[in-house]
Image (tube, rainbow, N blue to C red):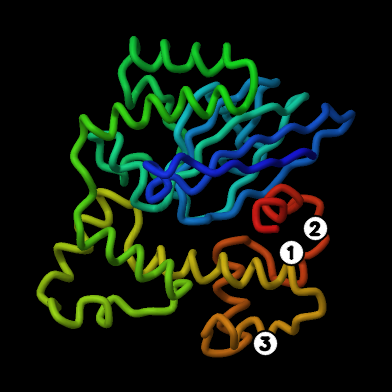
Amino acid sequence: MNYQTYQPHPDLESLVSCYWTLEVPAADEAQRQRIIPDGKIEMAFIFGDDIKRYTTGSNFILQPRAFVLGQTLEPFYVEPTGYVNSFSVSFYPYGFANFVSVPIKTLANKETPIKALFGEEVATKFEQKIIRGTDTQQRIAIVEEFLLKRLNETATVDTIVKSTVDALLETRGNTSINAILKENPSKRRQLERNFAKQIGMSPKQLGKVIRLQSALKMLLNKEGESLTNIAYENEYYDQAHFIKDFKEFTGISPKEFLGNENMALSAAFYK
């Protein structure tokens, strides 16, 4: 597995977390990979063989060749049908809303072809440019030109939404919405509505996902760290609370996560 990340242009770094590529040789027996929520929205382009995304049990769809994966609130499985070669843009929680006019909540828990978001003609031309790109740097340049043009044509995210997300990211999900709105408690309903529209999940759900991200990084990168200490460092009530939240978003316990072949891809994203 060859997973690489690249940083965005300074004009986009507040909206785009990173660009990343994934290349995996074809295997005789394809291994399903469980993908866990991370609070971000992905715009992905598939250049290799098709990738299955399981909906329930043995039922699956083939992911579009160019799509946006909205916010996910529960884990799901993907499985390559052969050679994997993909290029993706990873947006911060409020990032993608700056480039489209549709409510972000309509993109949740599914893959939406980019043609449905940017129009047939614009999306086809954009996708063909990406496909013809000779290397990752050229593809990044094509994406950034496209995004910067869109940024100047669409409305920006509500200030209160951005400041709330920033506060959650800064505190690793460990701040309450009441604390964020302490000077304007009357704006809570407005925040909840705008969050659903522009982020695709509630502030509380995003906070839980961000906190889990922090705990996952500790679990993967600090060998021998006890679950109790990880829970303490990330301000869970106790180890039981940490395990409960972990299972909610991954489907398994922290101990089962480590060394699990089905989690190899998700683990790579956090290392």
| Residue nearest the observer in this picture, 55 or 169 | 169
Q: Tell me the CA gap for discs 1 and 3.
A: 17 Å
Residue corresponding to mark 1:
257
Dot 1 falls on a residue whose secondary structure is: helix
Q: Is residue 15 left or right of residue 157?
A: right
Q: Tell me the CA gap for discs 2 and 1.
A: 5 Å
Residue at (30, 43) in percent of width and height: 97
- Identify the residue at the far left of this view: 186
Residue at (48, 34) in percent of width and height: 43
Q: Quadrant of the C terminus?
A: bottom right
Quarter-of-image position of residue 81: top right
| Circle 1 crowding by C-alpha within 10 Å: few under 14, some 14–19, many from 20 | many
The amino acid sitting under disc 2 is Asn
Compare marks 1 and 3 and give the one earlier in the sequence.
Answer: 3
**Horizontal and vertical percent position of residue 86:** 64, 29
Frontmost of labels 3 and 2 is 3
**Horizontal and vertical percent position of residue 29:** 86, 33
Residue corresponding to mark 3:
229
The amino acid sitting under disc 3 is Asn
**Horizontal and vertical percent position of residue 252:** 68, 65
Quarter-of-image position of residue 189: bottom left
Residue corresponding to mark 2:
260
**Horizontal and vertical percent position of residue 230:** 65, 81
Q: Are marks 1 and 3 in contact (CB under 8 Å)?
A: no
Residue at (61, 68) in percent of width and height: 247
| Circle 2 crowding by C-alpha within 10 Å: few under 14, some 14–19, many from 20 | few
Q: Are marks 2 and 1 in contact (CB under 8 Å)?
A: yes
